Image: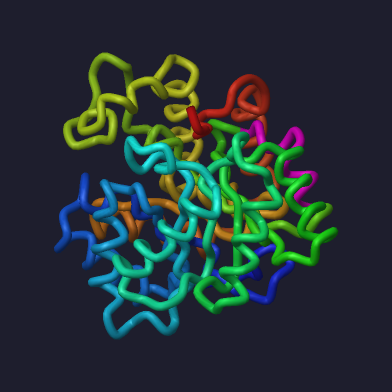
Amino acid sequence: MRYRRLGKSGLEVSVLGLGTNAFGKRADQETSIKIIHHALDSGINFIDTANIYANSESERIIGQALDGKRYNVVLATKAGLVRGTGPNASGSSRFHLQQELEDSLRRLKTDYIDLYQIHTFDPYTPLEETLRTLDDMVRSGKVRYIGASNYVAWELMKALGISEWKGFARYISTQISYSLADRTPENELVPMCVDQGVGIIPYFPLAGGILTGKYHEKETVPVGSRANTDPNFNRFLDDRTITLGQNVSKLAAEHGYTSSAISLAWLMDRPAVSTVIVGATRIEQLEDNLKSVNMNLDSEVTKELDELSNPFRYGKPFAFYRLP
């Protein structure tokens, strides 16, 4: 396994991280725990979850899996998206964040979070309130580092400016949809993160499985695929993304790679990317993803992938989660 510093912090994370939004939903508890243990045995030290994944089941399962194994894990979770129907059931207010942190700590069976992330920008709460709350959490020892998610470049830059002005703990990372099927972060966010020393953590690095080449047409999806088990995912399937997945799969086969591994390896080489989080519902998927860690793409393959995906630098992001 290879490791990198997360942004300009001193925290080292595996270049491949484990995403867990399928745990407790598309993967049952027994399977999820086996995947977590196999990931740790393979050198992955970065595990990412959120308070809302699988209605909080993901955090609970991770807490069970890490019993006796917590010390060497960089554990990341998030809060801020909608958790319920009450007036304070979402957002990044002090009220909501403190409540959610305590609940996450209980489910994860730990007394600290390594990376606590705001799941999306909250336009209804002053940024200073959010950042002061996060700073208090760091000072309390319940949180070690803080990160953002689904912030656009100006929102993230404003947060960094306030933290510097007030002497608060600073965001060291940001999570964003980023892949061969979504290169929109390269227009503004990536240059900003390079300049400010913020580590990028791509989510949906395989575009929800589209970049594996498994989809051939929107109307007929493979049994057990995300599009089959989660009908909401079908909004991501269209002729452009399906064609890209097929083309990446063809290119990978020509060079003796799998399409998953080549897509992840390409992303790991992008500026400011610290760790790439990818989920798995089977050990075999994780094994395939691990092949990306030691791949060295030559310049010609990288150029071909750049050209195939260049149209996806423009337009709407593949995925982007905001408060209603």
Left or right of 240 in this view: 307:
right
User: Residue 290's x, y, as percent?
Assistant: 42, 61
Left or right of 7 in this view: 212:
left
In the rendered image of this protein, does residue 8 appear above or below residue 53?
A: below
Left or right of 45 in this view: 169:
right
Q: Residue at x 55, y 63 (%)?
A: 15
Q: Residue at x 27, y 47 (%)?
A: 54
Q: What is the quadrant of residue 210 in the picture?
A: top left
In the rendered image of this protein, does residue 174 appear above or below residue 245?
A: below
The residue segment tinted magenta is 183-194
Q: What is the quadrant of residue 125 in the picture?
A: top right
Give whichever of 6, 311 is nearer the camera. 6
User: Residue 107's x, y, as percent?
Assistant: 29, 65
Give whichever of 150, 221 is nearer the camera. 150
User: Residue 261's x, y, as percent?
Assistant: 46, 50
Q: Is residue 46 visible?
A: yes
